[in-house]
Amino acid sequence: MAGSTLIEGGYVATMDPAGAEFPRGWVAIRGGRIVSVGEGAAPSDVRDAFPDRIDATGTLVTPGLVNTHHHLYQWLTRGWAQDSILFDWLVALYPTWSRIDEGTAGAAAAGAMAVLARSGCTTVGDHHYIFPRGSGDIVGAIAHESRALGLRLHATRGSMDLGESQGGLPPDFAVETTDDALVASAEAVTRHHDGSFDSMVRVAIAPCSPFSVTSDLLRESATLARDLHVRLHTHGAETVEEEAFCRERFGMSPTDYLESLGWLGPDVWMAHCVHLSEEDAARFGATGTGVAHCPSSNARLAAGIAPIRSLLNAGAPVGLGVDGAASNEHGRLGSEIRQAALLARLRDGAGAMPVRDALRMATMGGARVLGREREIGSLEAGKLADVVLWELGDVEHAGIADPVAALGLGSLPRVRRMLVQGEDVVVDGRLARADEREIAGRVVAAAERLKSA
């Protein structure tokens, strides 16, 4: 358990409901939780009570970033199908992904999460949906790697049961039966989910997408998740091809189709949501359905620009996601803040996404999407001590007028220090608990093994 730590002297952006910022502030931490936050120099009684001090002079201090959507296993297949749209990209990669197992998935997760950590991410949301027969406990392998690095994990047990022979996109060898997927999803929750306040691993149930799962699996997964009191996740309205698939097969838009199966609600979040109407955005807001916005991946696959301003104006929870490492090869969550701000402005005008709104999506927005707004996402007394100190003294940011703009519009700053539950995870831009060279070696070996299998 973490001791008593005082972070002082940095520019503190709390992301609390009032948006409080302190040009020179302090954050007091004890036992893995934030005790108090303040402006100016810490009072003498606070300094006396918190002997372990971190000098944050020259940094921007923010809550830890929350990644709401990723496919960690794809770290092993970066650089493939570089000029493809989503459907063609998937078809090119499914045969290789269908050989993934516990060992390769663990190596991939270590590599992808190492990069996430070094970009200021303290909470990782992962969507794994390919489980070849005999592949072992993939969710458990991912959870093991997150613990080794010291990161908070929201794993989702994904699934696909609509193979090519049934009119789906994935090849038949890459899918499970409906019953097998439901049983395995329940087992993953029972084995790995921790619903406590300071949980380091939570599990959600996550059928992959309308074009890779049956209506039965979507409907029954929703019932199962609610019986088990866990959250639901899927891809939704990502591409025009998905829109055409849903209209041809179901006679409905993706949002109408998912709603008909019980998939709008405050316990649901969907990735992408690029092709939503204003009415769809209003329904997301009214039902509290969350959105994982993945701007770089959407651009990489030419999916489009999501209507994020409309969703935020409607009150929908919106967080940021890196998405699959094979459709976002840099893998850094911190960079998505800038991407989100720029693409929203490209779509809706210069005032559509102030940098503080983009940072809020990466912190409190992500916490809302994952149902953890009471625990993480802002620097407030009583919350878990997930904190990032961004270095602003390097040449890239020296003299910048606004520290928040350094993160939201400038080059991604180096992480001087990152704490999860009050414990060091990154120090001076490097992992504090793991050997980066060892992880890189594991990634290279696993990628070669996957390609040659």
Image: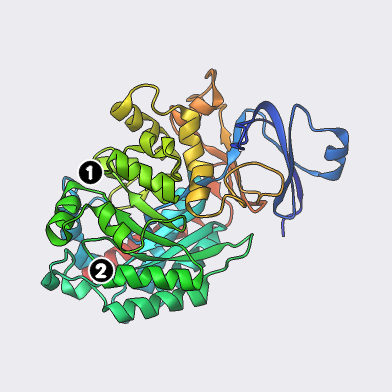
43 vs 347, nearest the viewer: 347
- Residue 126 sits above or below residue 85 on the image: below
Q: Where is residue 227 in the image (x, y as percent from the top left)?
A: 47, 73
Disc 2 target residue? 215
User: Which part of the image, by quadrant, shows the N terminus?
Assistant: bottom right
- Does residue 236 show up? yes
Using the rendered view, name the quadrant where residue 52 is placed. top right
**Which marked residue is nearer to the observer: mark 1 or mark 2?**
2
Q: For residue 173, which quarter of the picture? A: bottom left
Residue 429, image x, y percentages: 53, 42
Q: Name the image quarter holding the C terminus.
A: bottom left
Q: Identify which residue is drawn at 54% across, 43% down.
A: 364
Residue 260 position, x and y percent, is 30, 61
Q: Which residue is drawn at 56% across and 54% down?
A: 372
Circle 1: residue type: Ala
Q: What element carries label 1?
A: loop
Circle 1 packing at 10 Å, graded few (<14), some (14-19), many (20+), is: many
Task: Say if 164 sits above or below 7 in the image.
Answer: below
Q: Which of 18 and 394 is in front in this view?
A: 18
Taking 6 as reference, is 96 above or below it? below
Residue 117: x percent and y percent? 50, 49
Which SS class for mark 2? helix
Q: Mark 1 points at which residue?
A: 303
